[in-house]
Image (cartoon, rainbow, N blue to C red):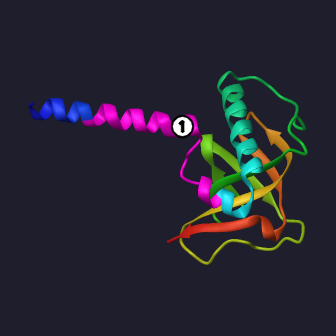
Amino acid sequence: MNISKIIALILILGHVCLRADEKKGNDGYQKTVATKGWTRDYNNGQHILKELSVKANEKKEIAITAYRGEKVSFVGGGAPPGATNDLLIDKGFYLRVVVPNGKDLRPHSVWWEVLIRGEILQVDLKHKIIVLKISSGDWETIQTG
């Protein structure tokens, strides 16, 4: 067997494994989400992100309150310019994080990734912005650097 066949076989095997993980819903965060007890909210958030992504790509319009009240959980990292609790999340969405007491929940680090849970207040699909209301207990730092 020559090297090109071995490389092709490895690539095919890798693709099959990735597809299997996608079908199981394994995105690398499931264990952390389950530990927090946020699996239902996380799955709901992933479902909503997929719906919104399709609608955004098709240039569809939705009411700003279309997803109001939905309980969701997302994983994201600090959004530029970095002076807020706001996050960049999957599918290119900007998550505007509203903390009722105004508390700064960001870790003291150059970069960070968090698991967050809350209630959707509104969605601006044209600009790919989701506004999420949370409490300080709904923010879990996953990693920093």
Q: Residue 50 colored magenta? A: no
Which quadrant holds residue 111?
bottom right
Query: Is residue 96 positioned above or below 105 on the image?
Result: above
Residue 5 point in image, percent of width and height: 16, 29
Give the amino acid type for the residue marked by disc 1 in the picture.
Answer: Glu
Q: Residue at x 86, y 38 (%)?
A: 67
Work out which quarter of the rendered image holds the N terminus and state it.
Answer: top left
Q: Residue at x 61, y 78 (%)?
A: 108
Classify residue 14 as left or right of residue 27: left
Residue 97 point in image, percent of width and height: 78, 58
Residue 93 point in image, percent of width and height: 67, 44
Considering depth in this image, is 88 or 120 the residue closer to the camera?
120
Considering depth in this image, is 99 or 11 the residue closer to the camera?
11
Q: SS class of the residue under badge 1?
A: helix
Q: Residue at x 68, y 67 (%)?
A: 140
Number of marks = 1
Q: Residue 20 colored magenta? A: yes
Residue that sits furthest to the left in the current view: 2
Tell me if mark 1 has few (under 14), some (14-19) or many (20+) residues whose alpha carbon lies within 10 angstroms of its own: few
Q: Residue at x 54, y 37 (%)?
A: 22
Residue 138 visible, this orientation: yes
Quickly name the residue at label 1: 22
Q: Which residues are magenta?
A: 10-32
